[in-house]
Amino acid sequence: MKVNTIAAFAALLSVTCPSAFAISFKDAAQNLLYFEYAALSADYCEQRGYPSRSVYSTWQQKYAHIQRDAVERILAEGESRGLPKSEQAEVLSQAIANQRKAASDNIAEKGVPCAKYRVFLDGYYELLKK
Protein backbone atom coordinates (compact mmCIF):
# COMPACT_ATOMS: atom_id res chain seq x y z
CA MET A 1 0.00 0.00 0.00
CA LYS A 2 1.49 3.32 -1.06
CA VAL A 3 1.68 5.96 1.65
CA ASN A 4 -0.03 9.22 0.78
CA THR A 5 2.77 11.77 0.42
CA ILE A 6 0.85 14.63 2.01
CA ALA A 7 -0.18 12.47 4.96
CA ALA A 8 3.41 11.27 5.32
CA PHE A 9 4.69 14.84 5.29
CA ALA A 10 2.12 15.91 7.86
CA ALA A 11 3.09 12.99 10.09
CA LEU A 12 6.76 13.87 9.77
CA LEU A 13 6.15 17.51 10.63
CA SER A 14 4.17 16.61 13.72
CA VAL A 15 6.97 14.58 15.29
CA THR A 16 10.48 15.42 16.31
CA CYS A 17 12.68 12.45 17.16
CA PRO A 18 16.03 12.65 18.82
CA SER A 19 18.73 11.20 16.61
CA ALA A 20 22.41 11.31 15.87
CA PHE A 21 21.85 14.50 13.88
CA ALA A 22 23.07 17.80 15.23
CA ILE A 23 19.71 19.44 14.52
CA SER A 24 16.17 18.24 15.07
CA PHE A 25 13.73 17.51 12.29
CA LYS A 26 11.79 20.64 13.22
CA ASP A 27 14.96 22.76 13.02
CA ALA A 28 15.85 21.21 9.67
CA ALA A 29 12.44 22.17 8.27
CA GLN A 30 12.88 25.69 9.66
CA ASN A 31 16.31 25.96 8.03
CA LEU A 32 14.80 25.01 4.67
CA LEU A 33 12.32 27.84 5.15
CA TYR A 34 15.14 30.34 5.68
CA PHE A 35 16.94 29.15 2.57
CA GLU A 36 13.72 29.55 0.58
CA TYR A 37 13.24 33.04 2.00
CA ALA A 38 16.79 33.94 1.00
CA ALA A 39 16.39 32.64 -2.56
CA LEU A 40 13.01 34.27 -3.12
CA SER A 41 14.23 37.50 -1.56
CA ALA A 42 17.03 37.67 -4.13
CA ASP A 43 14.46 37.29 -6.93
CA TYR A 44 12.24 39.93 -5.32
CA CYS A 45 15.08 42.44 -5.10
CA GLU A 46 16.36 41.70 -8.62
CA GLN A 47 12.88 42.42 -9.98
CA ARG A 48 13.04 45.80 -8.25
CA GLY A 49 16.40 46.72 -9.73
CA TYR A 50 18.65 45.76 -6.81
CA PRO A 51 21.45 43.40 -7.83
CA SER A 52 21.17 40.58 -5.31
CA ARG A 53 21.46 37.21 -7.02
CA SER A 54 25.25 37.14 -6.81
CA VAL A 55 25.08 38.16 -3.14
CA TYR A 56 22.59 35.33 -2.53
CA SER A 57 24.71 32.85 -4.49
CA THR A 58 27.79 33.65 -2.39
CA TRP A 59 25.74 33.38 0.82
CA GLN A 60 24.15 30.10 -0.24
CA GLN A 61 27.51 28.57 -1.17
CA LYS A 62 28.99 29.68 2.14
CA TYR A 63 26.21 27.98 4.10
CA ALA A 64 25.46 25.09 1.74
CA HIS A 65 26.58 22.64 4.41
CA ILE A 66 23.72 23.79 6.67
CA GLN A 67 21.23 23.41 3.83
CA ARG A 68 22.63 19.97 3.00
CA ASP A 69 22.38 18.91 6.67
CA ALA A 70 18.74 20.03 6.73
CA VAL A 71 17.93 18.01 3.62
CA GLU A 72 19.74 14.95 4.97
CA ARG A 73 17.92 15.25 8.31
CA ILE A 74 14.53 15.37 6.61
CA LEU A 75 15.38 12.37 4.44
CA ALA A 76 16.63 10.46 7.49
CA GLU A 77 13.38 11.17 9.30
CA GLY A 78 11.47 9.67 6.39
CA GLU A 79 13.73 6.64 6.44
CA SER A 80 13.25 6.22 10.20
CA ARG A 81 9.48 6.21 9.57
CA GLY A 82 9.86 3.37 7.08
CA LEU A 83 9.26 5.34 3.89
CA PRO A 84 10.88 3.95 0.74
CA LYS A 85 13.55 6.19 -0.84
CA SER A 86 11.21 7.31 -3.63
CA GLU A 87 8.64 8.50 -1.09
CA GLN A 88 11.35 10.15 1.01
CA ALA A 89 12.25 12.23 -2.06
CA GLU A 90 8.57 13.08 -2.59
CA VAL A 91 8.23 14.16 1.04
CA LEU A 92 11.35 16.33 0.75
CA SER A 93 10.05 17.88 -2.46
CA GLN A 94 6.70 18.60 -0.81
CA ALA A 95 8.45 20.07 2.25
CA ILE A 96 10.46 22.42 0.08
CA ALA A 97 7.36 23.40 -1.92
CA ASN A 98 5.47 24.14 1.30
CA GLN A 99 8.34 26.23 2.65
CA ARG A 100 8.63 28.08 -0.68
CA LYS A 101 4.91 28.91 -0.54
CA ALA A 102 5.17 30.20 3.04
CA ALA A 103 8.21 32.30 2.16
CA SER A 104 6.60 33.64 -1.00
CA ASP A 105 3.42 34.63 0.84
CA ASN A 106 5.42 36.41 3.54
CA ILE A 107 7.57 38.29 1.04
CA ALA A 108 4.49 39.34 -0.93
CA GLU A 109 2.92 40.67 2.26
CA LYS A 110 5.93 42.30 3.93
CA GLY A 111 8.48 42.87 1.18
CA VAL A 112 12.26 42.76 1.55
CA PRO A 113 14.70 45.56 2.49
CA CYS A 114 16.50 45.30 -0.84
CA ALA A 115 18.82 48.25 -0.24
CA LYS A 116 20.26 46.28 2.70
CA TYR A 117 20.03 42.82 1.17
CA ARG A 118 23.46 41.67 2.37
CA VAL A 119 22.62 42.59 5.97
CA PHE A 120 19.22 40.96 5.49
CA LEU A 121 20.94 37.68 4.52
CA ASP A 122 23.24 37.91 7.52
CA GLY A 123 20.08 38.02 9.63
CA TYR A 124 18.95 34.75 8.07
CA TYR A 125 22.29 33.17 8.92
CA GLU A 126 21.72 34.12 12.56
CA LEU A 127 18.35 32.33 12.47
CA LEU A 128 19.72 29.09 11.02
CA LYS A 129 20.01 26.23 13.48
CA LYS A 130 23.49 24.77 13.44
Image (tube, helix red, strand yellow):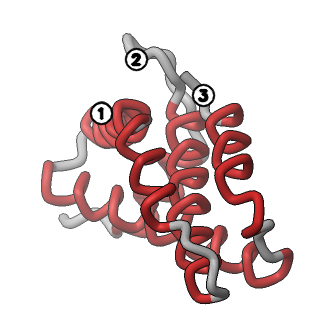
Give the Cα separation between the discs numbered 2 and 1. Answer: 9 Å
Q: Residues within 10 Å of mark 1 (few under 14, many from 20)?
A: some
Instruction: Give the amino acid at mark 2.
Output: Phe
Which-is-in-front pick, marks 3 and 2? 3
Q: Is residue 96 left or right of residue 5?
A: right
Residue 21 is labelled as 2
Instruction: Give the amino acid at mark 3.
Output: Lys
Q: Where in the figure is residue 105, as x and y percent of width and height?
A: 71, 79
Residue 36 seen in the figure = yes
Q: Nearer the viewer, residue 92 or 105?
A: 105
Q: Where in the figure is residue 4, as x and y percent of width and height?
A: 34, 69
Disc 1 marks which residue? 76
Disc 3 marks which residue? 129
2 or 1: tag closer to the N-terminus: 2
Instruction: Give the amino acid at mark 1.
Output: Ala
The kind of secondary structure element at disc 3 is: loop
